[in-house]
Image (cartoon, rainbow, N blue to C red):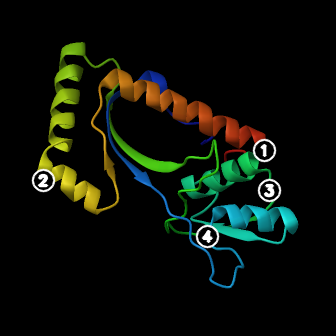
Amino acid sequence: MLKDLPYDTLRDFTPVTLMVIVPGVMTMNPKVPAKNLKEVIALAKAKPSSLNYGSPGPLTSGHLSMEMLKLTAGINIQHVPYKGGAPAIAESGVPGFDTYEWYGVFAPGKLPKDVLAKLSREIARIIKLPDMSEKLSAQGAIPVGNTSDEFAAFVKREMDTWGKVAQQVGLKPD
């Protein structure tokens, strides 16, 4: 999503493990006459361009998540970017709309396979320890701890998904 990066994400980094997925939360002003996402979608369809949504800023996960919702649900609502990272996504019940933030560990590209395997295995083991898993869950994160190959496939899917969303809505990197 950024223009002129000094590195190639897929070539210069080795995915080690996906640590956690953090589901987002969508909140609304209580004056909006909708109690859930389906009602927001119905309202947006009944009154096109009458709703606004805020995000932590352009090209952030909150912004892209809402752009994906607009595409998936076929609605038109106006983006209002802010400077900051407040939570902003939802458990929706809208088929094809599933967004979240995630955190993983990357190492330098071309890491020796034996080192990568050990690093991936140990981080995943630690993430799955009962104490660690409970602490992460208490913060709203879903512990994962997968293999390097699984994480690499996940990163590729994420890049494909969000690249398509950005192209479909005409977002350009700065």
- Distance Cα–Cα, label 1 vs label 2: 44 Å
Q: Amino acid at mark 2?
A: Asp
- Distance Cα–Cα, label 3 vs label 2: 43 Å
| Picture coordinates of residue 79, whole percent (x, y) | 72, 64
Q: Which residue is mark 4?
A: 82
The residue at 68%/61% (across/down) is 38
Q: Which residue is mark 2?
A: 131
Q: Nearer the viewer, mark 1 or mark 2?
A: 2
Q: Which residue is mark 3?
A: 75
| Picture coordinates of residue 3, whole percent (x, y) | 63, 40
Q: Is residue 51 above or below residue 68?
A: below
Q: Nearer the viewer, mark 4 or mark 2?
A: 2
Q: In front here: 43 or 136?
A: 43
- Distance Cα–Cα, label 3 vs label 4: 21 Å
Q: Which residue is mark 1?
A: 170
Q: Earlier in the sequence, mark 1 or mark 4?
A: 4
- Distance Cα–Cα, label 4 vs label 2: 36 Å
Q: Nearer the viewer, mark 3 or mark 4?
A: 3
The answer to whether residue 53 is visible is yes
Other-residue count near label 1 (Cα within 10 Å), few / some / many at <14 / 14–19 / ≥20:
few
